[in-house]
Structures are given as structure tokens and as C-alpha cells.
Amino acid sequence: MPETMPEQEARPENSDSSAPPPPRKMPRRNMLMILGIGINAVAATLFAVPIIGYIFAPARRRVMRADLAWVSLGQLTEFPQGETRLATYRNPLVRPSDGQTADIPCWVRRVSTEKLQVFAINCTHLGCPVRWFPQSGLFMCPCHGGVYYADGARASGPPPRGLFEYEYKVENGRLFIKAGQVPTLAQPPSQACADKPRRCACA
């Protein structure tokens, strides 16, 4: 009887011995390390942005000062002589995200035909908005009891000085102020306060 040959293993016709091996899975430790590096990079970027902004702030201020503009408060006839009225202007350094906060109020006092005073609404104590009371002829801060005379000089309370004043000019019957000026303690007090040291404790 003829010997039976052992059955040959069936091989697929399309088998390729040079096929790449299946991809190896990344170890869990390596994956966590990459994730940690990414989170630290994002955190470092968030911390670096304000620091870089602080370092380059002086250069930005020089650029912003070129944008300071004279902003109109309206017709001069809107501010009768002998009265103090509230006015509002749009901050010339506004950003799209500022919205309504860029509308800044101020007090306009018409002393005479040619003389005016434009006060920042901020109290010189902590920056709270002051209100004008025509019955008493005083500006008063409802938050901490600061009081100012009609000419901006400090009357009583915690404020260390008189109200801040904007530079102003009148052109073609309209009142303009230097709206890019931001009231700070580095600026001089109101001229009325400086002229009356007995009524004001300003330095």
C-alpha cells in the first residue's frame, strides 16, 4: 500500500510575510506623563500672560497716551450758569468687551460764562461715586461719608483731598474734556482745593 503523506498545513494564498507588526499600545505611565506636561504648559502660559503684560505695561502706556482724545460732553448751553449737572462721555480707550462700563459720568459746574469745572465722579477716598445735592450745595459720598464743597474742595470725612478735575476746552459752542485722563492719587487735586488750604487738608 502506498504510504499516506502527512497533510500539509493550509496557507492563505494572499499571506505576506513582510506585513508590519500591529502597533504597540502606549504604556499608561507614559500617557500620564505627557498629559501632565500638557497641563503644566497650559498653566505656565496662563501665569506668564499677566506677568508679561506687567513688564511691558510702560510701553503700552506710551502707545495709549497717543490715543488720548478730547471728548465732547455736549453743547455749552446744556450747562446753565450757576448749576452743576451730570454728564456722560464714552471712554476713548474703550475695548469691545467693555460694553456699558465705558460710559463714564462726570459732574460739570458752570461757574460763569467762560469758567467751568468738570469733576470726576469718583470720591478721592476709595473711588465711590459722589452725588451732587443742590439744596446744600455739596458733593457727598453715600458710602463712607465724604463731603466736598461745590468747587470740589474737601469739606469733611475720610477723603484726603478734593475732587479730581478734567482739563476742558470750549470750541464752536461745545464743551470738550481730556477724557483719556484717569483719576488717580498721582494727579493733582482740584484747583479749588489747592487755592483754599484752610478749607482742605490736601497736601
Image: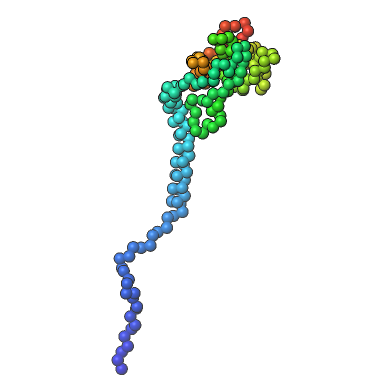
Give the x, y percent position of residue 134.
67, 15
Give the x, y percent position of residue 125.
61, 19
Asked whether 127 or 180 is in front, the reply is: 180
Q: Quadrant of the N terminus?
A: bottom left
Q: Is residue 32 above or below residue 175?
A: below
In the image, what residue occupies the spot 67% across and 21% down? 142
Image check: 165 left or right of 38?
right
Give the x, y percent position of residue 49.
46, 34
In the image, what residue occupies the spot 33% across and 75% down? 11
Give the x, y percent position of residue 181.
50, 20
In the image, what residue occupies the spot 43% across and 51% down? 30
In the image, what residue occupies the spot 58% across and 13% down? 110
Res 158 quadrant in image:
top right
Q: Residue lying farthest right?
A: 135
Asked whether 177 or 10 is in front, the reply is: 177
Q: How many marks?
A: 0
Whether residue 191 is visible, yes or no, is no
Q: Quadrant of the C terminus?
A: top right
Asked whether 194 or 158 is in front, the reply is: 194
Colour treatment of the image: rainbow
Q: Is residue 38 above or below residue 202?
A: below
Whether residue 15 is visible, yes or no, is yes
Image check: 6 left or right of 75?
left
Q: Is residue 26 above or below residue 178?
A: below
Res 126 quadrant in image:
top right
